[in-house]
Amino acid sequence: MTVRIGVLALQGDFREHISMLQSLGVTTAEVRTAEELEGVDALVIPGGESTTIGKLADRYGLIEPLRKRIAGGMPTLGTCAGMIFLASATVNHDQHQLGVLDAVVQRNAFGRQVDSFEADLNVDGVPGDPIHAVFIRAPWIEKVGADVEVLATVDGHPVFVRQDNILATSFHPELTDDTRVHAMIVDMTPIEEQI
Ligand code: GLN
């Protein structure tokens, strides 16, 4: 008996998430259709380009099914563009977003001269060493709703948040050897939902 974790595979680095989840011993599935979404217990939305992910999700009729499953409690992890797609709004930009995470995000927030950087993050609720986080043209969270718990910040800006069944990171946990963020989503998947 194992948890079946889907990775939204429309665009972006979904393969890296699949490898990381497989290293944790769970069953994985690439999700591109509403039917494939029905077959998973939890979902990871990868980094990539959030406007492209949104457009493709719209074209494949996935927006409403995703909203329904995530609002219905399916454990979901969004990383980087995945975080943007989960959020309710984007500063100065109109794009397809699920609006299930009560947060306003700023895209490419760390500025052009620092497109990419790495930082050691102390994350609330994650014991042991800090998480070594890789940021690539990363968003930060500009504003969070009352139900959103901020787990880590960079320069005072939230970069890792949790709202009930939803985890969202500005960084790319799938690009390091540290499996702790993915382990959180596996641990959040209730045993009775496992198939
Ligand atoms: N800059 C991208 C966006 O705004 C996100 C980058 C990433 O996912 N690494 O969609």
Image (cartoon, rainbow, N blue to C red):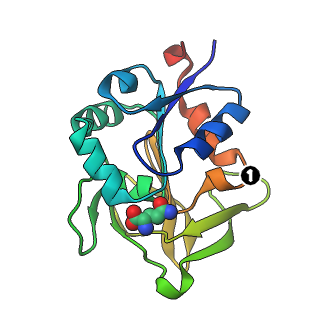
Relative to 20, say whether 127 is above or below.
below
Q: Residue furthest bottom?
A: 113
Name which residue lies at 26% across and 36% down: 60
* 141 with respect to 56 (left or right): right
Residue 53 rendering spot, x and y as whole percentages: 35, 51
Query: Looking at this view, is 177 or 186 the one in front?
Result: 177
Residue 159 rendering spot, x and y as whole percentages: 51, 65
Q: Exactly how many numbered labels are in the figure?
A: 1
Residue 172, image quadrant:
bottom right
Name which residue lies at 40% across and 43% down: 10
* 90 with respect to 31 (left or right): left
Residue 93, image quadrant:
bottom left
Ligand 1 is found in which quarter of the picture?
A: bottom left
- For the C terminus, the image quarter is top right
Q: Residues within 10 Å of mark 1 (few under 14, many from 20)?
A: few
Amino acid, disc 1: Pro
Residue linked to disc 1: 127
Question: From this viewpoint, is residue 145 visible?
Answer: no
- For the N terminus, the image quarter is top right
Residue 3 rendering spot, x and y as whole percentages: 58, 22
